[in-house]
Image (cartoon, rainbow, N blue to C red):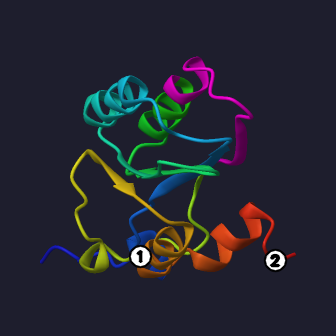
Amino acid sequence: MPRTHFPSNPQSLSTPIYHALIKTHHITSRKKVSTLKAAAEQHGVFALLRSGGVPGIMYVEGREKEGVEAWVGVVHDLRYKDYHLLARPEAREEPTPPEEVTEEKARLVEIDSVKEFGAKMEEKGVLAWWRKAMGYTS
């Protein structure tokens, strides 16, 4: 009778999600936003933008680190004013169990306020990470 193998480490059952955070002076160019939207679809990532004013904030996540890195590269190449990569592409500290992963389609969503952006970060379970990266907490 074949044996069923169960991993001794429950973390190995987790699905890694990679993410990164970028801050710019502002995000107002519709042409650049269109480029970022196409890049999100091309690289299979979900991107959240705080656009329309100061500051510009961009959060990106995906199942493949290479996709997140490629999207960050597109942002860098667009030469946004005061571009700062606040958090390099990395796996979340607490990987998400597969049954809890909500499938975000490869797309880009725009948010109007920092407060609303923070609420989205809380929904994703990365509020403390986001607040630290933004310099709101130490």
Residue position marked by numbered label 2 in the rendering = 137
Q: CA distance from mark 1 to mark 2?
A: 37 Å
Looking at the image, tell me whether mark 1 or mark 2 is earlier in sequence order: 1
Q: What secondary structure is found at the residue carrying circle 2? A: loop
For image coordinates 16% across by 73% down, the residue present is 2
Three-letter amino acid code at the position of disc 2 = Thr
Whether 43 is drawn above or below 54: the answer is above
Q: Amino acid at mark 1?
A: Pro
Circle number at residue 50: none
State the extent of the magenta-drawn residues as a range: 74-89
Residue located 53% across and 29% down the image: 75
Vertical side of 77 occupied by 83: above or below:
below
Q: Position of residue 69 (x, y in %)?
A: 53, 34
Q: Are marks 1 and 2 in contact (CB under 8 Å)?
A: no
Q: Quadrant of residue 80?
A: top right
Image quadrant holding the N terminus, namely bottom left
| Residue at x 21% of width, y 52% of height | 105
Q: Where does residue 109 sit, x and y in percent of width and height?
A: 32, 53
Extreme residue toward the left, this view? 1
Task: Determine whether 110 is above or below 70 in the image.
Answer: below
Q: Residue furthest right?
A: 138
Answer with left or right where residue 114 lies relative to residue 32: right
User: Which residue, given by chain and number where applicable, does mark 1 sit on?
Assistant: 7
Other residues around mark 1 within 10 Å, as few (<14) / some (14–19) / many (≥20): few
Residue 118 part of the magenta-drawn span: no
Quadrant in the picture for the C terminus: bottom right
